[in-house]
Image: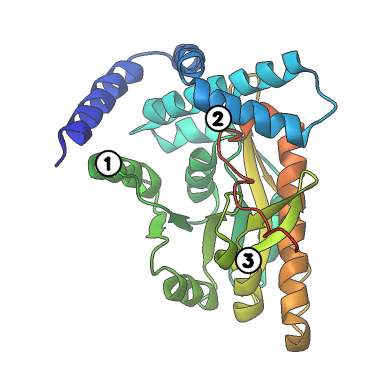
Amino acid sequence: MKLQHRLEALAASLVGGFVKRLTRPAALTLGRGLGSVWGALDRRHLEIAVANLRASLPDWGENQLYATARGVYRHFGSIVFDILWLEGRSAETYTRLVEFEGQENFEKAVAAGKGVLYCTAHIGNWEVYAAGHAILHERVAVLARPLDNPVLDARMSAFRTAWGNTVIYKRKALSRVIRLLREGQSVAVLLDQNVQRDDGIFIEFFGRPAATTTMAAALALKTGCALLPAHAVLLPDGRYRMRYEPALEVDPNPKLRDVEIARLTQLLAARTEAWIREHPEQWLWIHRRWKTQPEPKP
């Protein structure tokens, strides 16, 4: 194991042990504070966030752009510390921290018996959403990318699977996901990151072309599963609101497959954009979402 990985794992263990001794409000406050420090030191990614915000929300002034970008660091500092604080806590602890909206949409999708693909994004706290959903509703398979540090990845995997969820790493995951959906089970996937030109299509996201995976739409057409937009946001009182939206209507006509994939992919991106506009500081603006662009026309 690399020395860097060992040091990172040791630091996470020490910090996690300290955070567990705090009250949860104190842990969130400490996370926000360290997130502010992180933002002050990480000028490169702070400027990426500001540039993304400026292009996406052109009516905003510079003060609002920088305030929101710094808020992104505070938010993600708080949810990292929240995950550390929640490790090993009881199911009752989770149930006290969450409230659900649109539960009837989730129940209707599950009742159809064709599998559910929960389509979410890097907003709020997607890790707590998966845990809370497993505790109070059903277990899901979570599609994820392994962390570079194998020790931290094992720790994150333990958190994700503590309540019965399973983790499917993206590499060579497609056949397993198809099998689970055809068995009527549920899978959760994050759909808001940049992809290469050959790995997706261009849709409109905040008024600009954004290269986006078509995996969710293609899976719905192939398996008949429900496409259910869902996300969780951190509320001012420290609780999480977990929202399930109505499943998208899917046209199974094979002659319209490509058109339908593009339509569904655009609809899912539009739902993500709406969530971000409600809580802009809770989305990962430091990610280079618009990095891949269409080739210039001759």
> Which structural element holds mark 1?
loop
Up-down: is 32 above or below 233? Answer: above
> Which structural element holds mark 2?
helix
1 or 2: mark nearer the eye: 1
Residue type at mark 2 is Leu
Up-down: is 98 above or below 164? Answer: above
The 10 Å Cα crowd at callout 3, few under 14, some 14 to 19, many 20 or more, is some
Tell me the distance, in whole angstroms, between the alpha carbons under discs 1 and 3.
Answer: 29 Å
* Mark 1 or mark 3: whose residue is earlier in sequence: 1
Residue type at mark 3 is Thr
Q: Nearer the viewer, residue 151 or 166?
A: 151
Tell me the distance, in whole angstroms, between the alpha carbons under discs 1 and 2.
Answer: 30 Å
Residue 238 on image: x %, y %? 58, 22
Residue 144 on image: x %, y %? 43, 53
Q: Residue at the location (70% across, 31% down)?
A: 53
Residue 161 visible, this orientation: yes
Q: Which quadrant, please, contains the N terminus?
A: top left
* Mark 1 or mark 2: whose residue is earlier in sequence: 2
Up-down: is 158 above or below 139? Answer: above
Instruction: Find residue 213 and report its image quarter.
Output: bottom right
3 or 2: mark nearer the eye: 3
How many badges with numbers are in the image? 3
Q: Which mark is residue 97?
A: 2
Residue 64 on image: x %, y %? 74, 17
Q: Residue at the location (52% across, 68% down)?
A: 185
Q: Which residue is mark 1?
A: 149
Q: Which residue is mark 3?
A: 214
Judged left or right of residue 40, residue 228 is: right
The 10 Å Cα crowd at callout 2, few under 14, some 14 to 19, many 20 or more, is some
